[in-house]
Image (cartoon, rainbow, N blue to C red):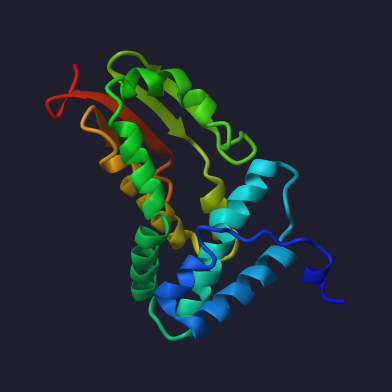
Amino acid sequence: MSQDSKIEIPMSKHFFPPLLAIIGKEKYERVFARYRDLYANHDLPQNQFLRLHLSEGILPGLAFYQILKESGESQESALMSIDHAFEQLFSDNVKKMKKLGRLPFIYPLLRLFIKRAMRPYPPEGWKIEWIQNDKKAIRFNMKSCFYHDILSKYGAPELTASFCHVDDLIYGNMSPDLLWQRPMTIAGGDAYCDFCFARAKKGRILK
């Protein structure tokens, strides 16, 4: 009996099967099989949120990246293919956040629920330092990143930036009342990621 038959392997509904229409059957089947192998052989954490991140993003993305490179794509080309695919795979998330962003009270709502919204990013995977939460801005630094840590162990730290790109897609145009900023990222070689949701008025940060 193979190792992957001994455990239940969760399959991301937003990643599989939508990826099929993007890359075609032959490559899709290779990515699908690689993901199953990665998950079955990964030392799974006890924290349910960390396991969810592994099955919903990290390991499917890694499987896709590995297959692209094994198919002959350069690192640069493979990452571009990943970014293009992620733009399609996460398009529903972008639409949902834009819909939420239409609320006239989106900023005070975000202030109220931001820490609750960060619960799926537990301290076992992310060391978060809260900097500011007032009428002007919500700021926090992430001094460690579970995605970067895991992908680094698999020799693919450069893939982390593609997941950062998804954040930019989701929050970058979420609302005219919010300005999303994150000039520093661990993926880009910085010591931490500096997240900021600034309250905006007529396209400018309130000072």
Q: Which residue does the image show at 23% across and 27% down from the upper left?
A: 177
Screen quadrant of the N terminus: bottom right
Examine the image and state in which quarter residue 42 appears.
bottom right
- Of all residues, the one furthest to the top in this rendering is 135
Q: Nearer the viewer, residue 25 or 40?
A: 25
Q: Is residue 188 visible?
A: no
Examine the image and state in which quarter residue 40 appears.
bottom right
- 183 left or right, relative to 113: left
Q: Which residue does the image show at 35% across and 59% down from the upper left?
A: 87
Examine the image and state in which quarter residue 89 appears.
bottom left
Q: Which residue does the image show at 43% across and 74% down from the upper left?
A: 21
* Total numbered labels: 0
Q: Nearer the viewer, residue 153 or 60?
A: 60
- 189 left or right, relative to 157: left
- Of all residues, the one furthest to the right in this rendering is 1
Q: Is residue 8 visible?
A: yes
Q: Which residue does the image show at 51% across and 63% down from the upper left?
A: 61
- 6 left or right, relative to 63: right
Work out whether 165 lies above or below 172.
Answer: below
x and y percentages locating residue 192 in the rendered image: 43, 39
Screen quadrant of the C terminus: top left
Work out whether 43 lies above or below 105.
Answer: below
x and y percentages locating residue 133 in the rendered image: 39, 17
Q: Nearer the viewer, residue 1 or 99?
A: 99
x and y percentages locating residue 194 in the rendered image: 37, 35
x and y percentages locating residue 183 in the rendered image: 29, 41
Q: Nearer the viewer, residue 180 or 74?
A: 180
